[in-house]
Amino acid sequence: MSLLKIYSASAGSGKTFTLAGDFISLLINNPGNYASILAVTFTNKATAEMKTRIIENLYLLATDASELNETEQKKQAGLLEYHREETGKSDRQISAACRLALTSYLNDFSKFNVSTIDSFFQQVLRSFARELNLRFGFDLELSSSGILGNTLDNLLDNNEANPEL
């Protein structure tokens, strides 16, 4: 499985299902790497949906079928089939890995790395603030109109420094 996958598809095409499936397959292959897996989406709604889907599917895969209702058992069977094909693991291995990953996330939820692209880049920027010589407590402006307005104000305020302007 590739370390980086990028999906571009229209709404309702199954991106969340595919991303959640890939996320869980990575966990099945190496549940100890739960803190090293990152999924990035564009909207807060998609992030919340993906987190919910991953946790629900991990739960279904980690739970004994006898403890599930009929609808959940059908969903579990489909998920097991999907992940057997994706990972080459047995149902027992899938269940054990999902149980370990689910427990890890529930005990250390801050390591559950599903975020929006802007949140991800803010986190990266804040991590390297010192190296970038940014002042402590800086604010990120995500609105292009706000940035353009500030740039124009700075340009007009400093027009004496460049007479050609």
Image (spheres, rainbow, N blue to C red):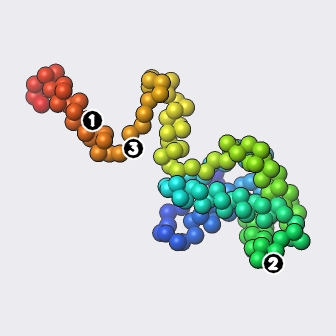
3D distance between C-alphas at marks 2 and 1: 59 Å
Query: Which comes sooner in the sequence, label 3 or label 2?
Result: 2
Element on which disc 1 rests: helix
Q: Amino acid at mark 2?
A: Glu
Is residue 91 at all visible to an observer of this figure? yes
Residue identified by numbered label 2: 70
State the image quarter where residue 16 is shown. bottom right
Amino acid at circle 1: Asn
Q: CA distance from mark 3 to mark 1?
A: 13 Å
Give me the disc on residue 37. none
Q: Tell me which label, 2 or 1, sits earlier in the chain.
A: 2
Judging depth in this view, the residue of 69 and 136 nearest the camera is 69
Mark 3 or mark 1, earlier in chain: 3
Where, quadrant-wise, is the N terminus in this rendering?
bottom right
Q: Secondary structure at mark 2?
A: helix
Separation of marks 3 and 2 at Cα, in angstroms: 46 Å
The residue carrying pointer 3 sits among few (fewer than 14), some (14 to 19) or many (20 or more) residues within 10 Å by Cα, namely few
Say which mark, if any, is on residue 150: 1
Specify whether 158 is left or right of 13.
Answer: left
